[in-house]
């Protein structure tokens, strides 16, 4: 299992199918499609804004001793996010988190399936896939810094 | 100085009354943790999104991730010594969500917990030495740590929600 499998043919395709089922091909965009597109755009913008907020975090931002995210890591996370948006514009992250050790974490939740990507160094994405009833799968990928 | 002493003794009295109400007036924070005890952990609220009730799995495993100061392990607190609500308002950036885990279940995951009373921390402080900050980790170590954090997430339940508190 790797990211290409995940973002390509497996669960995501099924989810995309479910999302689009009922809306047949049409030259004109239906109001439902327009609303979905608007919602997706807002979700992506919200994720980018979250990352921009991380630039302003300082050490101990949580009052429990967290390290502020490294600027290079945040910048790399922006690149990763833009890559994902190009690959799969219909799947913005469910949440974007600043971890207490300074890394940046993206999470996608679809029903009971969870995909997490942790950027802990520029250009390095640590994936974790959780499927109910299975032990989590882990893998690491490099991407352009 | 006198004011400080008065504050401290008031605090001790509060702690004693709390233990009295729970039927354990003479238990010490240094006593070993019983299997049926509840352990509490603070989770950042506000915009942190570590706990997002709109998601099917609201709690994220990084709520159990050590920070650079957790060299002896991540902090938990024993409900025997502090209520979830009180804990939710303790700390430098309150309020916090507070999640609750049964100590027996934590032990079943293979994690040890050590009572570490600390005057700078709320009452009932303990640490999980198996989840301590290690700086750079190998991929295998990261994976093992993430598995433990996922296991903790799965047995945790919300004990205090500051957004619902009045």
Image (spheres, helix red, strand yellow):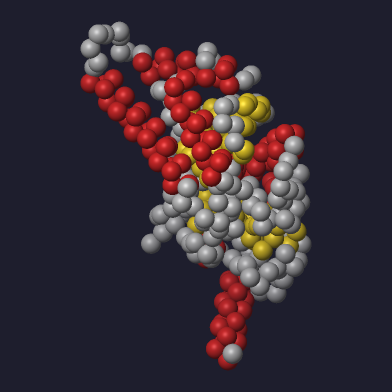
Q: Position of residue B164 (x, y in %)?
A: 40, 55
Identity of the residue drawn at 55% across and 51% down = A68
Identity of the residue drawn at 41% across and 14% down = A17
- Whether residue B34 is visible, yes or no, is no
- Whether residue A121 is visible, yes or no, is yes
Q: Position of residue B91 (x, y in %)?
A: 54, 64
Give residue B87's quadrant in the image.
bottom right
Q: Nearer the viewer, residue B21 or A77?
A: A77
Q: Horizontally, is A33 left or right of A86 in the view?
A: left
Q: Horizontally, is B93 left or right of B129 in the view?
A: left
Q: Nearer the viewer, residue A33 or B13?
A: A33
Identity of the residue drawn at 50% across and 31% down = A79
> Where, quadrant-wise, is the N terminus of chain B in this rendering?
bottom right
Give above or below for A13 relative to B146. above
Q: Horizontally, is B52 left or right of B140 in the view?
A: left
Give above or below for A96 relative to B36. above
> Where, quadrant-wise, is the C terminus of chain B in this rendering?
bottom left
């Amino acid at each position: 299992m790797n990211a290409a499998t995940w973002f390509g043919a497996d669960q995501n395709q099924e989810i995309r199918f479910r999302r689009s089922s009922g809306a047949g091909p049409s030259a004109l965009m239906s109001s439902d499609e327009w609303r979905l597109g608007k919602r997706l755009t807002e979700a992506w913008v919200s994720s980018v804004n979250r990352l921009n907020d991380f630039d302003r975090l300082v050490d101990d931002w949580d009052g429990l001793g967290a390290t502020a995210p490294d600027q290079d890591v945040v910048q790399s996370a922006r690149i990763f996010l833009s890559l994902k948006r190009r690959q799969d514009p219909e799947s913005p992250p469910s949440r974007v988190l600043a971890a207490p050790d300074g890394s940046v974490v993206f999470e996608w939740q679809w029903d009971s399936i969870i995909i997490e990507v942790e950027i802990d160094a520029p250009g390095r994405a640590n994936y974790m896939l959780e499927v109910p009833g299975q032990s989590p799968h882990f893998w690491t990928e490099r991407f352009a810094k | 100085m006198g004011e400080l002493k008065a504050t401290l003794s008031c605090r001790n009295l509060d702690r004693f009354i709390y233990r009295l109400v729970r039927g354990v007036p003479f238990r010490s924070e240094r006593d070993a943790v019983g299997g049926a005890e509840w352990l509490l952990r603070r989770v950042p609220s506000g915009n942190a999104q570590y706990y997002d009730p709109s998601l099917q799995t609201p709690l994220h495993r990084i709520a159990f991730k050590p920070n650079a100061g957790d060299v002896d392990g991540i902090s938990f607190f024993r409900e025997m010594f502090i209520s979830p609500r009180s804990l939710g308002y303790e700390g430098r950036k309150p309020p916090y969500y507070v999640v609750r885990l049964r100590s027996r279940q934590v032990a079943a995951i293979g994690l040890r917990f050590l009572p570490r009373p600390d005057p700078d921390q709320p009452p009932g402080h303990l640490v999980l030495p198996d989840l301590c900050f290690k700086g750079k980790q190998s991929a295998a170590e990261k994976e093992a740590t993430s598995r433990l954090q996922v296991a903790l997430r799965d047995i945790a339940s919300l004990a205090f929600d500051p957004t619902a508190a009045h």
